[in-house]
Amino acid sequence: MNQAAYVAVDWGTSSFRLWLIDRAGNVLGERRSAEGMMAAGKPGFANVLQSHLEAVGAAQELPVLICGMAGARQGWVEAGYVDTPAPLASILRQAVKVPDQDRDIRILPGIAQRDRNAPDVMRGEETQLLGALGLEAKGDAIVCMPGTHSKWVTAGGATVERFATFMTGELFDVVSRETILSHAVNGADEAEDVEAFKAAVIAAREAPAFAANLLFQVRSGGLLFGGTAAAAREKISGTLIGLELAAGLAGGIPAAGITLVASGRLERLYRLAFDTASVSVRSIAAEDAARRGLAMAAAAIWNV
């Protein structure tokens, strides 16, 4: 039977994921819950973690490595930031040890861009970057990490040079739920209208200054010419993602194309969006990238 070497945790704002890992990187046990940073404060981060450690039978001597919002100012222990340009190796060196614990628990830092003209921060995505690019990366890369707050990262080798955050996912949620466009998408089924999405991506990339108008056309087009709620949803999504691509691709595309860190529906939508721009994509699942990054960090910190 394989023996566990460490515990890896991705502790987000609203989600908690824990893996019991052996030296070969195999997952021996797993836990998932909605006990993210926002929910863990009341029962206590230590109590939440301990309950999951007991559930997977983690031995008392096993170390725990955490990435994500548990290291935020409002989290368990503030883990700070590594400033850009940020070598990915420096993330490993600046892991913060949680005090007053019986076991060795460490939290990885985020990355900060202290540019007054383009201030930005990430926490959790730096571990995905580590898993997606590795410590021996060569050449230039652009990494697109879709989500509630999408990240576009420009890397030179294994160093994060610059990055930008786009509130694409959050804007989609607000626009589709809290504006007049909520009527257009009400009752939308799971069917994906690929053509409506791609047309919206193209329109937004070609005329990003008309973004607010393009969004209203979801309503006016539906009133005048009909269409399904699913098509309306894809037009909103395509418009917002098209705006993101207009900015993210403005500086040019490296020869290797784009590294896309995403899963599920987001991975499919962004692949479609990149297809409209004739941009090649190398894809890695977001969870795989996080777990791989945590494994690299654990190897560097504990030699496991």
Image (cartoon, rainbow, N blue to C red):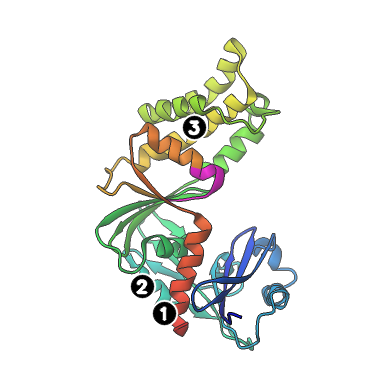
Question: Which residue is painted at 64% across and 33% down in the image?
Answer: 190
Label 2–label 1 contact, CB within 8 A: yes
Element assignment for label 1: helix
Q: Is residue 138 left or right of residue 242?
A: left
The crowding category of the residue bearing disc 2, from other C-alpha atoms within 10 Å (few below 14, some 14 to 19, many at least 20), is: some
Between disc 3 and disc 1, the foreground one is 1
Q: Amino acid at mark 3?
A: Gly
Q: CA distance from mark 2 to mark 1?
A: 9 Å
Do callouts 3 and 1 mark residues in contact (Cβ within 8 Å)? no
- Residue 147 in magenta stretch: no
Q: Position of residue 238 (x, y in %)?
A: 49, 32
Residue matched to label 2: 89
The x and y percentages for residue 69 are 57, 64
Which comes before the other along the chain, label 2 or label 1? 2
Residue at (69, 63) in percent of width and height: 35
Residue that numbered label 3 is attached to? 238
Instruction: Residue type at mark 1: give it.
Output: Ala
Q: Disc 3 or 1, which lies upstream in sequence?
A: 3
| Residue at 46 percent of width and 59 percent of height | 122
In this view, the residue farthest toward the front is: 1
- Disc 1 target residue: 300
User: 217 or 54, which lies in front?
Assistant: 54
Which segment did they paint magenta? 260-267
**Exactly how many numbered labels are in the figure?**
3
Q: Is residue 153 above or below residue 110?
A: above
